Image (spheres, rainbow, N blue to C red):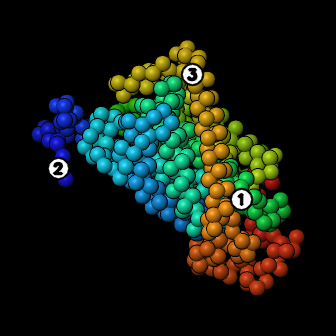
Amino acid sequence: MEVNFTYATASNDMVYTAEDGTQFVYNAGDIAWTLASTALVWLMIPGVGYLYSGLLRRKNALSQLWLCMVTIGVVSFQWYIWGFSLAFSDTGGVFIGDLRYAALVGVLEKPSMGSVRIPSIVFCVYQLMFAAITPMLAVGAIAERATLGPIMVFIFVWSTLVYDPIANWTWNANGWSFKLGGLDFAGGTPVHISSGTAALAISIYLGKRRGYGTERLAYKPHNSSYVVLGTALLWFGWFGFNGGSALSANMRAANACIITNLAASVAGVTWMLWDYRLEKKWSVVGFCSGAIVGLVAITPASGFVGPHASVAFGVVAGTVCNFATKLKFIFGYDDPLDIFASHGIGGMVGNILTALFAQKSVAALDGFSVIPGGWPDHNWVQLGYQIADCCAGFGYSLVMTTVILWIMHFIPGLRLRASEEAEIVGIDDAEMGEFAYDYVGIDADLGPKDTEMQRAESPALTEKDHPPVAPHGERQ
């Protein structure tokens, strides 16, 4: 493999010479920060797995950890085949890219679309992490009632038909939202609205779990330590998620890191206080839930707002998303992990607040970005752009995810809904033959298979190990 670049002796920067003689200098510090951020975002994916696993019953805990690892594998292959090209080809259209960079042909030393200070291959692997975590956020909605094999097909197809187009129109210079003037620094629409809405579509398609509306499903998270571990990995990785989106080691990245941490902190305390009013208990699960929605909400704004605004993001997100967990009871869908309330609603909150607080002076901290700003800069129309982006992301993800699910429904072997027996004994046993804990096979949750069906038929069946509190701490 022959590439046309040299290293500057003093700074160790890379100098790439294009075919027309134009020279591009790749900053070694920017490359290092972006690659470090790539590793940070990778850690977020098992973080999601541990968070989801801890919130469920123990008989379904391992399947979520399986999902996070398989998602990395499937999406990495999809990104290599055509995902990166469909999202970030510089010759694509306003809606989706083309196959110019399929199989990563031509993706190495050329300047990246995101920044001319890093090569395309660095930008490619960084964006791969965003592409991988997004379907993982969504497929948590299959919890406790879906087969695992077909989900790999779903992840590949969904990434191609849903994530890649939304990423293209949001971040690609040719995309319609990018051209319109939408502001989304790190993935409010491509990552959070798309995944949260997909989770809603999955929840509606799969229907309610067995025992929905009874005490059998009014359980506390089986492992709050996993919830804390997952939140810690997500919070840690989010410094690379938002700070790394600057694609440069500069003041804009530093500002993104401080406001990311502040929004999460304020939202965590806000959610916990709202939960305290119900139980008069200081819930660690409540704090973790709030911290996650604070991170979600600040994501689209992290390159455009300052610390004062991030406090408002935390308070509003922690409040709105806490009450949004009641939507599943109002509309009658079974979202076991409140993914739509946390990521779908949280992403919308973040997008809208971005219009209200974005400042062109903050974007200019990197030394070259120029935006019209939001309401502080009297750019009133920005709110319309942000709402349009929310509606487009929500509508497209909801419709396309539903279409994908129902097409798979009528293809032999690809139907997602698990059998009644599999749901009763647990997805870990039925689909994997493995358990998260050595003792789960004899735990009261599971019981002997030959009597479990009889126990499940009894309306008096309860989760004896878990008092009747819903996954995020609210009363059913």
Residue that label 1 marks: 206
Earlier-in-chain disc, 3 versus 1: 1
Earlier-in-chain disc, 2 versus 3: 2
Nearer to us of marks 2 and 3 is: 2
Q: Quadrant of the C terminus?
A: bottom right
**Which quadrant holds residue 220?**
bottom right
Q: Residue furthest left?
A: 9
Q: Are marks 2 and 3 in contact (CB under 8 Å)?
A: no
Nearer to us of marks 3 and 1 is: 1
Q: Residue at x 63, y 80 (%)?
A: 439
Q: Residue at x 69, y 65 (%)?
A: 417
Q: Taking 454 as reference, is 321 left or right?
A: left
SS at circle 2: loop
**Would you place residue 152 above or below residue 27 in this image?**
below
Say few, some or many: other residues with alpha carbon within 10 Å of mark 2 (under 14 / 14 to 19 / 20 or more).
few
Residue 423 placement (x, y as % from top left)? 71, 70
Q: Residue furthest right?
A: 459
Q: Amino acid at mark 2?
A: Glu
Earlier-in-chain disc, 2 versus 1: 2
Q: Residue at x 51, y 56 (%)?
A: 156
Residue 100 placement (x, y as % from top left)? 36, 43
- The span from disc 2 to disc 1 (Cα, nearest Å) is 51 Å
SS at circle 1: helix
Residue 217 placement (x, y as % from top left)? 77, 63
Towards the viewer: 52 or 280 = 52
Residue that label 2 marks: 2
- The span from disc 2 to disc 3 (Cα, nearest Å) is 45 Å
Residue 366 placement (x, y as % from top left)? 36, 28
Residue that label 3 marks: 382
* Marking on residue 399: none
Q: Residue furthest top?
A: 378
